[in-house]
Structures are given as structure tokens and as C-alpha cells.
Amino acid sequence: MGNHQLHILCLGLSHQTASVSLREQLAFTPHRLESSLARLGCGDPGNLGEIRELVILSTCNRVELYAATASDCFSTLENFLTETQNIPLDQITPLFYRLQGKAAIQHLLNVSAGLDSVVLGEPQILGQVTDAYSIARKHGTVGKILSRLFQTAIQAGKRARTETTISHNPASVASVAVKLISQSVPDLEAANIMILGAGEMAELAVEALRKRGAIQITVVNRTLQHAQELAQRWGGQAASLEMLLNLLPDTDIVITSTGAPHTILQTSMIAPVMETRPSRPLVLMDIAVPRDVDIDVAEIPGVSLFDMDTLTAKLENALAQRVAEVPYVEAILAEELDCFLEYLATLDVVPLIIKMHQRADEIRQAELEKTIRRIPDLPPDTQQQIDVLTKSIVNKILHSPTIRLREEASGPNAIDYADIARGLFGLD
């Protein structure tokens, strides 16, 4: 980077460096994120010192601060993060990664493309990067550096998903489970679906079902309140575990993920249900560890049972297909990185080129005015023609130096070329 540019920094931690509990403590709630950026955007940077621009990316898997700064002030970012979230600095300092310049830029591109995600190529992170940038813009904490960086990252993420198939094959337990279910029950929209459990995996299953058109979803859980909360988030129904036997006869699909230490669905429970509906199949998807469904249930006529063993094989195949796409994604990111680095390089040169043209035009106008004063009877239209002519001459003279400066802006001798131009045109 040139002498006159801001530094690009990334301070963060993620699923690769910090536990879930610590990430939860550091994560920004929507309100806290808005208030933190609003304070900075209103010109009250507190202890931010030389930080000129800031974007906060906070998800369940990562908390990252991207900053454009006048110096390498990681300590300022660390203090801002820990003070904002009220966590002692010494607890998390060893867990931070600190990236600068090209490494920080490359990291954001990787994140946006899904290469740094828990599930390779997952699509949610691109939306989260976009949202982080939008919120920062709303509060005025981004300028030309981070605006261009995040626009580049968003474009890179979109290209990765449209020009490769890294996001095409379901590669999470929930998405693979729902894909398998849809092969057995093509019309998910008409199916009655039960979700047994109300934890994170259950929610991911509901989300995947909704994306495939499922409508009638009932969440069943030992704690009714948890079932109600999950059902409310996704527009479904809720029931307590005591209602399980009453609901099963009219259920087409059951996805189980309870975390119980013992099986919940046994042959003695399912067999009588199937006797009352011999022509209506039942699909059981057990994504719990340990099992929620007794393996013998698979022997009951009309029952299709899928478990983690089935899913693991499918998941490994899907992940292998995604891994095969990584080199193609990396090639896209390399193109976007080069474009952004070229943009950074021109930031020093563009003001210089403007000053060159301004200086030349000042000289042109001064000489033109002298000439017109010497020829007082010069008609106005002739004066206009001379004005246009002299502008054209100046532009043609400066054309080659301007092109050369732009070409050299991203080269190793960019600073030397800029200094020489300043000296030649008296712009120091």
C-alpha cells in the first residue's frame, strides 16, 4: 500500500478460535450493534483514535471488526470490542486473529464466499456480510476504503455461488435430511410434519423445510415454552411431548432431534399407529445423537427410517463435491483481490493527476487571459474557440503522463513515479 493510504485491519475471533459460549458473550445484539455504530457515526469515536472507518460483522460463528485506520492500532480495536461487550480483555486477547492489509482483504473475501464457514460454501454468510455493510453505511462509519472493500467482497461471494457449484449440494445435517425426506415425500407442501425437539438442529430443520415449501409444521417438545418459541419464529404449531401419541396418526414426517439419553419412538408406539393407517406411509428422520428412534422401527410396514449413519454418507459425498469447487472459488477471489488492490493503488495517484490537470489549467487560463488583453477587439466566438483549443492542447500534453501514472499505480515503482510527477509539476 502507498504512503498516503489508510491501513486495512481485521480483528476477530470465530468458531476456529473461540468456544460457542465465548462467541455468544462477544456477539453484538442488533440493538447494541446499531447503538455502537450510531455513536461512532455521530462523531463521538471515544477512544477510537486513528480509526477512520469501521464495519462490525457479528454472527453466531464469528465476531470481526474491519477498520480503515491511520496506524496499526489493533489495541484500540481490542479495547473497543471488550469495553462495548463488557468482557475482560485478558480473557480473549489470545483468541483474536489480527490481520492487516492484503491478509485482511483476503480473509473477508474468503468469509463472504463461504470458505471460512463451519459448512463450506454455506449461503447465509453472504447475507450477513451484506447486512453488516448496510448497517455501517446507515450510521456513516464507512468511507471510500471499506465501502469498496465490502462491495468487492459481496460481489466475490455472489460470483462464487453463481459461477461455481460450491453452494449447490446440501452440506449440513439438516439440509441433507430434508433433501432425503423430499425424495420420499415430494409434496412437502401437503405433508403434516412433526419436529420432535426444539434445539438448534431442530430449528435448522424447520428452516430447511420452509425453504422447500413445507407449510404444516408442529414442534413437539418436553418443555412446551421452547416448542412455542420455535414454532412462533417460523409460523408453525406447538405441542407438549404428552401430545405425541395423539399427533402421530395424522403425521406424515417426523424429524427427531431431542438430545434425550434414551429412545423416544419405539416399535410398541409406532406399530399400533401404522395399523390404523396401512396405506399412509410414515417417514422418520432421526438426526439425534444418541438415537431418538429405536432402529427396529424400520421393520414396521409403511415406515421409512433414516438416521445419522445414512446422513453421514450423504453428507460426506456432498462435502466432497463442495471441496472440489474450492480451487474455482479461489480463482474468482484472486481476480477480485487483484481488482481491489489496483483500486487501492490508484487512490494515491488520482489526487495527483487531478492536481496536475488543475495546475496545467491554471497556467493555461493565465496565459489565455494575457493574450486576450493584448488583443482587445477579439470577437467573443473567437475567444471561445481559442479557449477550447488551449484546453485540447493541455489535455493532449497531459494524456501520456496521466496514462503512465495510472499504469504504474499498482507497480513496485508507483511511489517513485508519483514523487517525480510532483517535482516536475511543482506540486510538492
Image (spheres, helix red, strand yellow):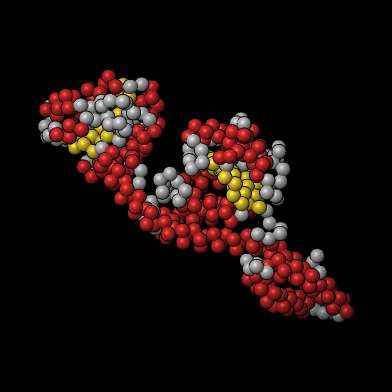
Left or right: 60, with 305 as reference point: right
- Closest to the observer: 260 or 368? 260
Residue 240, how many percent across, how many down? 31, 21
**In the rendered image, which quarter is residue 238 located in?**
top left
Query: Image height check: is 69 above or below 330?
Result: above
* Residue 312 visible in the snapshot: yes
Tell me the quadrant of the picture where the N terminus can be found: bottom right
Q: Extreme top residue here? A: 242
Left or right: 399, with 34 as reference point: right
Residue 306, how many percent across, how many down? 23, 38
- Closest to the observer: 59 or 376? 59
Q: Extreme right residue here? A: 374
Residue 348, how many percent across, how many down? 69, 62
Picture residue at 48% right of the left edge, 43% below the top: 16
Number of marks in the rendered image: 0
Q: Extreme front residue here? A: 94
Residue 356, how many percent across, how many down? 75, 69
Left or right: 365, with 165 as reference point: right
Left or right: 156, with 285 as reference point: right
Query: Image height check: is 190 above or below 109?
Result: above
Tell me the quadrant of the picture where the C terminus can be found: bottom right
- Closest to the observer: 35 or 47? 47
Picture residue at 82% right of the left edge, 79% below the top: 378
Picture residue at 26% right of the left edge, 40% below the top: 309
Query: Image height check: is 272 above or below 355?
Result: above
